[in-house]
Image (spheres, rainbow, N blue to C red):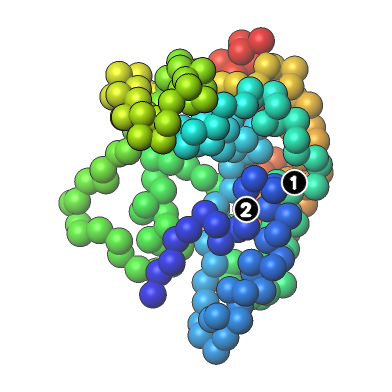
Amino acid sequence: LVWSYEGFAGNSLVGYRNAPRVAEALREITEGLYVTVPVYLRRQDLFLESVYAQQVFAGASASFDAFANRYAAQDFDWHALLATYADAFGHDALRPRRYEPAALLDDFAEAVGVPLREPGQHPVRNPSCSALGIAALRQSNDQLDRNQQKRFRAAIKSLSPKPAGQSLVFFTAAQRRVLIDRYALSNALAAQRFFGTAEGEALFAPIEEPLLDAE
C-alpha cells in the first residue's frame, strides 16, 4: 500500500506546525504495520515560492510579500519536521530526500520499494504557470467567480506555461538571503542527523546565480 499526499506533513499554510498531530494520527492508523516514510525537502525559499504559486492558481490574490511575511522562523523547520516523524515511526523508517523534480517518480519508487511504472514508460509532465501567468491570475482572481477562475486558469496554463526546469522567482535577492540565513542552522542539523552529511556540508545547493538577479 503506497500513500502519497503533501498533507501528510501537515498544513503548509500554517508552516507545518500541526505536523505532530498528523504524525500521531498516521502512526495510530498504521499501528502494527511495517512503515517507511519518504519525506521530500526543498530549500525553503524555493518551497515558499512554489506554495505561493499554488495558492494563486487555486484562487488567492494576496501579494507575495503578504503571503511570505506571515511565516516565522519555527515554520518550515525541516529538522523539526523530520524529528517529528522519526519520533512517531522510528529513525530507520524515514527516507529523507532532496526534492528533484526531474527524477521524482523514480526516486519515490526506490524509496518505497515499489515500481510505479512499467519499464520504458515515460513520465507525463504536468506543466505549471509561468511567473507572468501567476501575476495575471492574481490580478483577476477577485474579479471572477469560481467557474470563471477555472476557465481562466486553463487558458493561462496553456498560454503561459512555466518552462521545464525554470524556477519561479518572487523573492528579491535580499529577501532570499535573509530567508536562507533564517533556516541555516535547522538545515545543517537536518543534513547531519538525517542525511548523514559531514559537519559543515550544506543540506541544499547554494543560491543559484540567476535567482540573485531577481532584485
Foreground mark, 1 or 2?
2
Q: Which residue is mark 2?
A: 11
Q: Quadrant of the C terminus?
A: top right
Disc 1 marks which residue? 75
Local packing at callout 2 (Cα closer than 10 Å; few below 14, some 14-19, many 20+) is some
Identity of the residue drawn at 52% across and 54% down:
6
Q: Nearer the viewer, residue 149 or 162?
A: 149
The image quadrant of residue 169 is top right
Taking the spot 60% from the left edge, 21% from the top edge, the residue there is 170
Q: For this view, does 6 lie left or right of residue 144?
A: right
Label 1 and label 2: CA atoms lie apart by 11 Å
Image coords of residue 129 (percent x, y): 40, 26
Question: Residue 15: where, in percent of width, then height?
Answer: 70, 47
Would you say residue 164 is visible in this rendering? no
Viewer-proximal residue among 199 and 182: 182
Q: Tell me if residue 88 can be seen.
A: yes
